[in-house]
Amino acid sequence: MHSEFANRLCIDKDLKYLKGVGDARAKLLASELGMHSCSDLLFYFPGRHVDRSRFYHIRDLYGTEMPYIQIKGRFINFSREGEGRKQRLTATFTDGDRLCQVTWFAKIQTIGNMYRPGVEYVLFGKPAFKYNAWQFVHPEVEVFDPERPPQGLRGIYGLTDTLRKRGFTTRLMQTLVANLLDSIPEGSLPETLPAEIIRERHLVSFDEAIRNMHRPSSMQMLQKAAERLKFEELFYLELHILEFSRKRNLQLKGHIFSKVGPLFNKFYSDVVPFPLTGAQKRVLKEIREDMRTGRQMNRLLQGDVGSGKTLVAFMTMLLAVDNGKQAAMMAPTEILATQHAEALARWAQPLGISTALLTGSTRTAERRRIAQGLADGSIHMLIGTHALIEDSVEFRDLGVAVIDEQHRFGVAQRARLWKKGTVPPHVLVMTATPIPRTLAMTVYGDLDVSVIDELPPGRKPIQTWLRYDDNRNEVYRHLYNEIRKGRQAYVVYPLIQESEKSDLKSAEEGFERLKGLFPGIGVSLVHGKMKPAEKDFQMQKFASGGTSILVATTVIEVGVNVPNASVMIIENAERFGLSQLHQLRGRVGRGAELSYCILMSKRQIGTDTKKRLGIMTETTDGFLISEADLKLRGPGDMEGTQQSGIAFNLKVSNLARDGQIVGQARDAAMRLLDGKMLLLPDSIAILNRELQIRFARSIDWSRIS
Ligand code: ADP
Ligand code: MG
């Protein structure tokens, strides 16, 4: 697992030669933990530490469960209880003042013969208060040695069941690590960060950090050690990402759009029916800056659902047309592409701009017409699905490509758009999955980030309620009242069909039930297993007001716009992630009416789930929600992060929890690349060695002035 570090350290020798390991244990460590060399063990940090610097008295234990502690005393008696496999060995232990119970369920024979009454022992474990006494189960036991110095903080290492069964204990791991650390002269582990950075950030040395991760001299040193290793990891990640994107920027020449021409100006002054929000204006300015530089723009536009990204996209596309180029917009679903095409056509028409829609279901004749129009330049804007990136689609001169809902597209697909022209088009990627800025800068490291952090004025916040299955009648009454007022509603289910394996509610079942409950009210059903044409038909029927209720699975999550819909009911809401709930909720609240989002859940839910659903009822701020989501789930799970193209392999740091260190690391990497930090030759050697080990690449520092 950590073998990549092996060649850096002089201690890359095979683990089996380490004192206390040998052939058999080395094989186990390799197969169970992927450890091969001594440096792998060195980088196998404890999951937590326990304080062995003091002995507790039984009378001082408190609560019902203590952390790992140690007590000193004597066994009074042993007794075997139970029969056969349920047999156990119990002992009474005293620290001279009070009594406690010790229990073993395995190795009873050996243990029974091992410990003697009268001898002074140290018990080490995690006592719990049960049956009116403090209980230790399978504690570690050792003979008390008055000569031995106090041990301080000790690491607890993650072990697999197999390792445990084969005799690996916390104690053994500590001994092995101690053997290793003692075999390396103090201060001799080679430094992995430039001295300039260590000095500036007051970091502890690599050698100190490693030793203190395993055997910290104090809680404070443990923290410093962790901080240093986190900084180091994030610093190299940022250095790698930043330098990579700079190089790309230098290489990729882009179109220069010097003109904010008549179309853009006319649209702004005559066509757009409302004033732009401050955030929209700011983002457009950032985009225009990009387009003047002569480098290809690669920008991520983040904005909550309903924040008005489409308008920004359209105006960006106008810049292309104003400068004699074409523009394209790609959406992840046919429904969404169609909606975009309609919105854009409405805006484009008064300007005399021609648009076209290309999807998988576009007929051959229309395809031919589009191909012709793209080639001769008479189509200015093309909107569509994946169909856009097919090889047969050729533009005369593509200047801007917009990709909506980034997380549905991979980096590879984005790159295919680039190839549609000799000069790559400027690329604007839009996402409604808000990612906190520090994370976004790292996850989408190859993109610049713009944020629309403001909703158009006059939006009424969506009322969000949490209701349980036994409130169902009340919920349906509310639904009925809204429909009678002429509104429409979504009801979302986690499953398509009923399943014997799960007690989750299904869309098909819900569809039948709602039809039965509300005779005379039109109900549509869409789910992912329907044929696209049938799905579109049902969607369109709902969108045009032909039906009042849309029963769906999460296929409707992305982008659909039905302003008259004012109710969103989400069944088994406990099964959805926060970001997904937020996306779903964003389907309502798009019109002038007060809207409702009702989260249905079973009554028995865990505390984390309750917390999650509670956040939804408290805020509609996508960034707060995404931050909370990140804290609850960690970044690995976040939609979009996997496809970002950056292999995250963080060992000590956590992008969610270490946001501050991410910022500092990024800042240091940036200053280094800007030539604002003077480096000695030794430091440059360190940087290149580390980049080589971590990312198999190096940087030509002579280019950085
Ligand atoms: P999203 O960012 O989720 O893609 P849209 O672009 O679909 O949001 O915009 C949502 C709605 O808000 C649309 O009906 C759009 O016309 C409207 N809108 C966009 N910008 C503004 C604005 N500045 N003022 C008022 N309404 C706006
Ligand atoms: Mg949108």
Image (tube, helix red, strand yellow):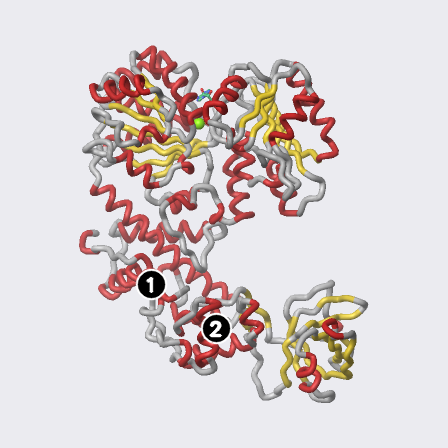
Residue for point 71% across, 35% down: 469
In the foreground, 107 or 238? 107
Image quarter of residue 256:
top left
Residue 214 in the image: above or below residue 444: below
Image quarter of residue 389:
top left
Q: Residue 450 carries which label?
A: none
- Residue 255 place in picture, x, y as percent: 21, 31
Q: What's the amino acid at mark 1?
A: Leu
- Residue 645 place in picture, x, y as percent: 36, 46
| Precedes in sequence: disc 2 or disc 1 | 2
Distance CA(mark 2)–CA(mark 1): 33 Å
Q: Which mark is residue 28?
A: 2
- Residue to which mark 1 is pinned: 193
User: Could you tell me how many numbered marks the image carries?
Assistant: 2
Q: Is residue 438 in view?
A: no
Residue for point 72% across, 69% down: 61
Residue 352 in the image: above or below residue 431: above
- Residue 115 place in picture, x, y as percent: 69, 85
Q: Residues within 10 Å of mark 2 (few under 14, many from 20)?
A: some
- Residue 365 place in picture, x, y as percent: 30, 17
- Is disc 2 placed on a helix, strand or loop? helix
Q: What's the amino acid at mark 2?
A: Leu
